[in-house]
Amino acid sequence: MIPSIALTAATLQQSEVQAQSRFERRIQERIEKRRLQEESKLTDTQKQQLFEARRDWLLSSYDQRLALLNSGQTCLESAQTFDAGKTCREKQRQARRQLLEQSRQVMNSERQRVGLSPLRPLKPFSV
C-alpha cells in the first residue's frame, strides 16, 4: 500500500512540475515575442550595441557556464541515490538561475541605455 501511495505522490508532483513548466514556457515565449517586437524597432546602431553587449556577456561568462555543466556532470556521475540525483538537479537549477539573473542585469542596463524596457525577473509574479 505504501509504495502505491509514494508512486501516486511522485506522479502528482511530476504532473505539477510539468504543468508549471508549460506555464513558464508560455510566459517565456510571450516575453521573447515582446522582446523581439521591441528590438525590431531599434536603429541599426542600437541593434549593434545590444549585440555587442550580449556577445561580451556570453564570452565573459563562457568559463562560468562550462564549469556549471562540468560540475553538474560530476555531481550526477557520483550520485548513487534518487535523493542525491535530485540534490544535483536542484543545485544545477539554482546555479543556472543565478547565472541567468546576472545576464539579465547586464542586459537590462544595456537595454535601458538604448531605450528598451527591462527584461522581467526570473519569477514572473515576483515583486
Image (spheres, rainbow, N blue to C red):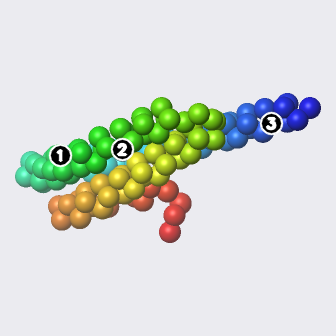
Residue pointed to by mark 3: 6
Q: Position of residue 55 (x, y in %)?
A: 16, 46
Apparent side of residue 2 relative to residue 70 in the rendered image (left or right):
right
62 with respect to 85 (left or right): left
Q: Residue at x 40, y 48 (%)?
A: 96
Query: Of tags 3 and 1, which is closer to the observer?
Result: 3
Q: Residues within 10 Å of mark 3 (few under 14, many from 20)?
A: few
Q: Position of residue 111 (x, y in %)?
A: 23, 59
Dot 2 surroundings within 10 Å: few (below 14), some, or many (20 or more)? some
Count numbered badges in the picture. Answer: 3
Residue 73, quarter of the rendered image = top left
Of tags 1 and 2, the one toward the viewer is: 2
> Is the residue under label 1 in contact with that under label 3 (CB below 8 Å)?
no
From the viewer's perspective, is residue 60 above or below residue 108? Answer: above
Residue at which label 2 appears: 68
Give the residue type that dot 2 points to: Leu
Residue at the extreme right: 1
The residue under the point 31% across, 43% down is 67
Question: N-terminal of the two: label 1 or label 2?
Answer: 1
Give me the residue at 28% from left, 48% from top. 64
> Label 1 amino acid?
Leu
Asked if marks 1 and 2 touch (Cβ < 8 Å), the reply is: no
Secondary structure of the residue carrying tag 3 is helix
Vertical position of residue 80 compared to residue 126: above or below: above
Q: Is residue 66 visible?
A: yes
Which residue is tagged 1? 59
